[in-house]
Image (spheres, rainbow, N blue to C red):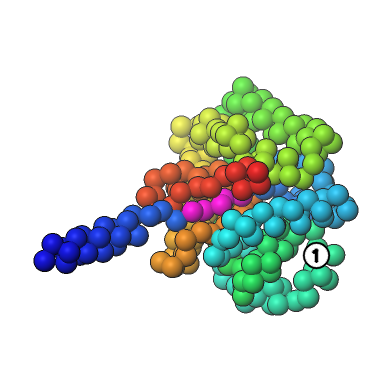
Amino acid sequence: MQKIILLLAFILFNNVSAQTKKKQILLIGTFHFQNPGLDIAKTNTFNVMSEKSQKELENISEKIKKFGPDKIFVEWGYDKQDKLNKLYARNSDSLLGKKADERVQLALRTAKKLGHKKLYAIDYNKTHFPYDSLTKGMKEANQEDLMKKNLESTTQFEKSFNENIKKYNLTELLIDFNTKKFINQDLQWYMETALRAGKTDNFVGAFLVSEWYKRNLYMYSLIQKLTDSKDEKIMVLLGASHAAIIRDFIAHDPTFEIVELSTVLK
Protein backbone atom coordinates (compact mmCIF):
# COMPACT_ATOMS: atom_id res chain seq x y z
CA MET A 1 0.00 0.00 0.00
CA GLN A 2 2.81 2.40 0.90
CA LYS A 3 4.48 1.69 -2.43
CA ILE A 4 1.28 2.57 -4.29
CA ILE A 5 0.92 5.84 -2.35
CA LEU A 6 4.56 6.74 -3.06
CA LEU A 7 4.09 5.96 -6.75
CA LEU A 8 0.97 8.14 -6.95
CA ALA A 9 2.78 10.97 -5.15
CA PHE A 10 5.70 10.69 -7.57
CA ILE A 11 3.37 10.83 -10.60
CA LEU A 12 1.52 13.84 -9.15
CA PHE A 13 4.80 15.65 -8.44
CA ASN A 14 6.02 15.07 -12.00
CA ASN A 15 2.72 16.29 -13.45
CA VAL A 16 2.84 19.48 -11.37
CA SER A 17 6.49 20.05 -12.33
CA ALA A 18 5.69 19.60 -16.01
CA GLN A 19 2.84 22.09 -15.75
CA THR A 20 4.96 24.75 -14.03
CA LYS A 21 8.09 24.38 -16.16
CA LYS A 22 8.57 27.57 -18.12
CA LYS A 23 9.04 27.59 -21.86
CA GLN A 24 12.29 29.21 -22.99
CA ILE A 25 12.32 32.09 -25.45
CA LEU A 26 15.47 33.10 -27.27
CA LEU A 27 14.38 36.67 -28.00
CA ILE A 28 16.68 38.37 -30.51
CA GLY A 29 16.35 42.08 -31.17
CA THR A 30 18.21 43.13 -34.30
CA PHE A 31 18.86 45.96 -36.72
CA HIS A 32 17.44 45.40 -40.18
CA PHE A 33 20.17 43.80 -42.25
CA GLN A 34 18.90 45.31 -45.50
CA ASN A 35 18.31 48.71 -43.88
CA PRO A 36 15.26 49.68 -45.99
CA GLY A 37 15.23 53.22 -44.55
CA LEU A 38 11.76 52.91 -43.02
CA ASP A 39 12.86 53.68 -39.45
CA ILE A 40 13.04 57.22 -38.04
CA ALA A 41 16.78 56.92 -37.46
CA LYS A 42 18.70 56.74 -40.74
CA THR A 43 21.81 54.63 -40.33
CA ASN A 44 24.51 53.25 -42.57
CA THR A 45 24.26 49.68 -43.84
CA PHE A 46 26.29 46.86 -42.31
CA ASN A 47 27.42 44.34 -44.92
CA VAL A 48 26.12 40.96 -43.77
CA MET A 49 26.95 39.44 -47.16
CA SER A 50 30.71 39.75 -46.67
CA GLU A 51 32.69 36.52 -46.27
CA LYS A 52 33.43 37.36 -42.64
CA SER A 53 29.78 38.04 -41.75
CA GLN A 54 28.62 34.91 -43.56
CA LYS A 55 31.02 32.81 -41.47
CA GLU A 56 29.66 34.49 -38.34
CA LEU A 57 26.08 33.77 -39.38
CA GLU A 58 27.01 30.11 -39.85
CA ASN A 59 28.50 30.06 -36.36
CA ILE A 60 25.54 31.88 -34.80
CA SER A 61 23.02 29.57 -36.48
CA GLU A 62 24.96 26.48 -35.36
CA LYS A 63 24.89 27.64 -31.75
CA ILE A 64 21.17 28.41 -31.95
CA LYS A 65 20.71 24.95 -33.42
CA LYS A 66 22.34 23.52 -30.28
CA PHE A 67 19.90 25.57 -28.19
CA GLY A 68 17.21 23.77 -30.18
CA PRO A 69 14.13 25.98 -30.63
CA ASP A 70 11.02 24.03 -31.63
CA LYS A 71 9.70 27.02 -33.61
CA ILE A 72 11.10 30.26 -34.98
CA PHE A 73 8.95 33.41 -35.17
CA VAL A 74 9.79 36.37 -37.42
CA GLU A 75 8.71 39.92 -38.17
CA TRP A 76 6.56 39.15 -41.19
CA GLY A 77 2.88 40.01 -41.69
CA TYR A 78 0.85 37.33 -39.94
CA ASP A 79 -1.76 37.50 -42.70
CA LYS A 80 0.92 36.78 -45.31
CA GLN A 81 2.02 33.41 -43.95
CA ASP A 82 1.49 31.86 -47.38
CA LYS A 83 4.11 34.16 -48.91
CA LEU A 84 6.54 33.32 -46.13
CA ASN A 85 5.91 29.62 -46.78
CA LYS A 86 6.74 30.12 -50.46
CA LEU A 87 9.94 31.95 -49.57
CA TYR A 88 10.91 29.19 -47.15
CA ALA A 89 10.34 26.55 -49.83
CA ARG A 90 12.81 28.17 -52.23
CA ASN A 91 16.39 26.95 -52.67
CA SER A 92 18.30 27.84 -49.51
CA ASP A 93 21.70 28.37 -51.15
CA SER A 94 20.19 30.78 -53.66
CA LEU A 95 18.39 32.77 -50.97
CA LEU A 96 21.39 32.93 -48.64
CA GLY A 97 23.59 34.09 -51.50
CA LYS A 98 21.28 36.90 -52.61
CA LYS A 99 19.03 38.19 -49.82
CA ALA A 100 20.59 40.14 -46.96
CA ASP A 101 17.29 40.17 -45.02
CA GLU A 102 17.77 38.98 -41.40
CA ARG A 103 14.72 36.73 -41.75
CA VAL A 104 16.63 34.85 -44.43
CA GLN A 105 20.20 35.13 -43.19
CA LEU A 106 19.49 34.25 -39.56
CA ALA A 107 15.98 32.82 -39.13
CA LEU A 108 15.67 30.77 -42.32
CA ARG A 109 19.30 29.62 -42.14
CA THR A 110 18.76 28.36 -38.60
CA ALA A 111 15.34 26.82 -39.25
CA LYS A 112 16.71 24.82 -42.19
CA LYS A 113 19.53 23.47 -40.03
CA LEU A 114 16.94 22.37 -37.48
CA GLY A 115 14.80 20.67 -40.11
CA HIS A 116 11.81 22.92 -39.47
CA LYS A 117 9.01 22.88 -42.04
CA LYS A 118 8.31 26.62 -41.81
CA LEU A 119 8.91 29.96 -40.15
CA TYR A 120 6.05 31.58 -38.24
CA ALA A 121 4.84 35.06 -39.26
CA ILE A 122 3.70 37.23 -36.34
CA ASP A 123 3.87 40.89 -37.38
CA TYR A 124 0.71 42.96 -37.09
CA ASN A 125 1.15 46.20 -39.03
CA LYS A 126 -2.40 47.52 -39.20
CA THR A 127 -1.52 50.26 -36.76
CA HIS A 128 -0.35 53.86 -37.09
CA PHE A 129 2.92 55.53 -36.16
CA PRO A 130 2.18 59.26 -36.75
CA TYR A 131 5.70 60.56 -36.19
CA ASP A 132 5.18 63.61 -38.42
CA SER A 133 2.09 64.55 -36.41
CA LEU A 134 4.09 64.05 -33.23
CA THR A 135 6.80 66.52 -34.24
CA LYS A 136 4.12 68.90 -35.56
CA GLY A 137 2.40 68.75 -32.17
CA MET A 138 5.66 69.64 -30.44
CA LYS A 139 6.10 72.63 -32.74
CA GLU A 140 2.54 73.87 -32.27
CA ALA A 141 2.94 73.61 -28.49
CA ASN A 142 6.26 75.50 -28.63
CA GLN A 143 8.01 72.57 -26.94
CA GLU A 144 11.47 73.65 -28.00
CA ASP A 145 13.29 71.68 -25.29
CA LEU A 146 11.35 68.54 -26.20
CA MET A 147 12.04 69.02 -29.92
CA LYS A 148 15.72 69.41 -29.13
CA LYS A 149 15.70 66.30 -26.94
CA ASN A 150 13.91 64.32 -29.65
CA LEU A 151 16.41 65.35 -32.31
CA GLU A 152 19.35 64.65 -30.02
CA SER A 153 18.15 61.13 -29.21
CA THR A 154 17.76 60.28 -32.90
CA THR A 155 21.09 61.80 -33.81
CA GLN A 156 22.84 60.01 -30.96
CA PHE A 157 21.41 56.65 -32.03
CA GLU A 158 22.52 57.19 -35.63
CA LYS A 159 25.99 58.25 -34.51
CA SER A 160 26.35 55.35 -32.08
CA PHE A 161 25.23 52.73 -34.61
CA ASN A 162 27.41 54.12 -37.41
CA GLU A 163 30.41 54.08 -35.08
CA ASN A 164 29.67 50.57 -33.86
CA ILE A 165 29.50 49.04 -37.33
CA LYS A 166 33.05 50.25 -37.88
CA LYS A 167 34.45 48.61 -34.74
CA TYR A 168 32.14 45.64 -34.08
CA ASN A 169 31.67 42.44 -36.00
CA LEU A 170 28.15 41.09 -36.62
CA THR A 171 28.09 38.91 -33.51
CA GLU A 172 29.12 41.83 -31.30
CA LEU A 173 26.51 44.09 -32.89
CA LEU A 174 23.72 41.61 -32.24
CA ILE A 175 24.77 41.13 -28.63
CA ASP A 176 24.94 44.92 -28.18
CA PHE A 177 21.38 45.30 -29.50
CA ASN A 178 20.21 42.95 -26.75
CA THR A 179 21.90 44.60 -23.78
CA LYS A 180 19.93 46.34 -21.02
CA LYS A 181 21.50 49.68 -21.96
CA PHE A 182 20.13 49.57 -25.50
CA ILE A 183 16.74 48.20 -24.42
CA ASN A 184 16.25 50.89 -21.76
CA GLN A 185 17.23 53.69 -24.15
CA ASP A 186 14.69 52.50 -26.69
CA LEU A 187 11.79 52.27 -24.22
CA GLN A 188 12.76 55.57 -22.62
CA TRP A 189 11.98 57.55 -25.80
CA TYR A 190 8.32 56.49 -25.70
CA MET A 191 7.86 57.35 -22.03
CA GLU A 192 10.07 60.42 -21.74
CA THR A 193 9.62 62.11 -25.13
CA ALA A 194 6.70 60.81 -27.18
CA LEU A 195 4.04 60.95 -24.43
CA ARG A 196 4.85 64.60 -23.66
CA ALA A 197 4.33 65.84 -27.21
CA GLY A 198 1.63 68.40 -28.01
CA LYS A 199 -0.72 70.71 -26.13
CA THR A 200 -2.86 69.43 -23.25
CA ASP A 201 -5.76 68.70 -25.60
CA ASN A 202 -3.52 66.99 -28.19
CA PHE A 203 -2.90 63.33 -27.41
CA VAL A 204 -0.87 62.50 -30.50
CA GLY A 205 1.99 61.24 -28.31
CA ALA A 206 -0.24 58.95 -26.27
CA PHE A 207 -1.88 57.73 -29.48
CA LEU A 208 1.48 56.94 -31.10
CA VAL A 209 2.69 55.06 -28.03
CA SER A 210 -0.61 53.17 -27.67
CA GLU A 211 -0.48 52.14 -31.33
CA TRP A 212 3.10 50.94 -30.92
CA TYR A 213 2.15 48.92 -27.86
CA LYS A 214 -0.93 47.60 -29.67
CA ARG A 215 1.21 46.30 -32.53
CA ASN A 216 3.57 44.55 -30.16
CA LEU A 217 0.77 43.16 -27.99
CA TYR A 218 -0.82 41.63 -31.07
CA MET A 219 2.53 40.12 -32.02
CA TYR A 220 3.00 38.70 -28.53
CA SER A 221 -0.53 37.31 -28.61
CA LEU A 222 0.40 35.40 -31.77
CA ILE A 223 3.54 34.05 -30.10
CA GLN A 224 1.37 32.75 -27.24
CA LYS A 225 -1.26 31.24 -29.53
CA LEU A 226 1.21 29.58 -31.89
CA THR A 227 3.35 28.07 -29.14
CA ASP A 228 1.96 24.60 -28.47
CA SER A 229 2.06 22.75 -25.17
CA LYS A 230 4.74 20.43 -26.56
CA ASP A 231 7.03 23.34 -27.55
CA GLU A 232 9.71 23.70 -24.89
CA LYS A 233 11.91 26.29 -26.62
CA ILE A 234 11.21 28.95 -29.23
CA MET A 235 13.18 31.66 -31.00
CA VAL A 236 11.76 35.10 -31.82
CA LEU A 237 13.63 37.37 -34.24
CA LEU A 238 12.38 40.97 -34.38
CA GLY A 239 13.53 44.53 -34.85
CA ALA A 240 15.21 45.66 -31.63
CA SER A 241 12.44 48.13 -30.71
CA HIS A 242 9.84 45.37 -30.88
CA ALA A 243 11.98 43.03 -28.81
CA ALA A 244 12.50 45.69 -26.13
CA ILE A 245 8.75 45.98 -25.45
CA ILE A 246 8.06 42.26 -25.75
CA ARG A 247 10.63 41.68 -23.03
CA ASP A 248 8.29 43.51 -20.67
CA PHE A 249 5.37 41.31 -21.69
CA ILE A 250 7.38 38.16 -21.07
CA ALA A 251 8.44 39.44 -17.63
CA HIS A 252 4.77 39.37 -16.58
CA ASP A 253 3.89 36.07 -18.24
CA PRO A 254 4.71 33.07 -16.01
CA THR A 255 4.56 30.74 -19.02
CA PHE A 256 7.87 31.93 -20.47
CA GLU A 257 11.41 32.83 -19.53
CA ILE A 258 13.99 34.62 -21.67
CA VAL A 259 17.25 33.00 -22.67
CA GLU A 260 19.78 35.67 -23.61
CA LEU A 261 21.52 35.60 -26.99
CA SER A 262 24.85 36.20 -25.27
CA THR A 263 24.32 32.97 -23.27
CA VAL A 264 23.53 30.92 -26.38
CA LEU A 265 26.55 32.28 -28.25
CA LYS A 266 29.08 31.48 -25.50
Q: Main secondary structure of the magenta part?
A: strand
Q: Which corner quadrant holds the C terminus?
A: top right
The magenta-colored residue range is 24-28
Place of residue 164 in the rendered image (x, y in percent of width and height, measured from the top left): 78, 35
Q: Which residue is nearer to you in this view: 102 or 143?
A: 102
**Residue 178 x, y percent position in the rendering:** 62, 41
Report if residue 139 is visible in the image: no
**What is the residue that sits farthest to the top in this orientation?**
145
Q: Can residue 4 be seen from the camera position used here?
A: yes
Residue 70: x percent and y percent? 54, 65
Q: In this view, does 261 lie above or below 66?
A: above
Q: Nearer the viewer, residue 49 or 22?
A: 22
Which residue shows up at 39% across the image and 50% down it? 253
For disc 1, the neighbor class at 10 Å (few under 14, some 14 to 19, many from 20) is some
Residue picked out by circle 1: 96
Q: Is mark 1 on a helix, strand or loop?
A: helix
Front residue (pair 58, 189): 58
User: Which residue appears at 57% of the width and 71% of the height?
Assistant: 79
- The verdict on residue 27 being magenta is yes
- The image position of residue 148, as x and y in percent, is 66, 25
Residue drawn at x 70%, y 57% is: 62
Query: Above or below — where is 105 with respect to 39?
Result: below
Q: What residue type is labelled 1?
A: Leu
Q: Is residue 244 magenta?
A: no
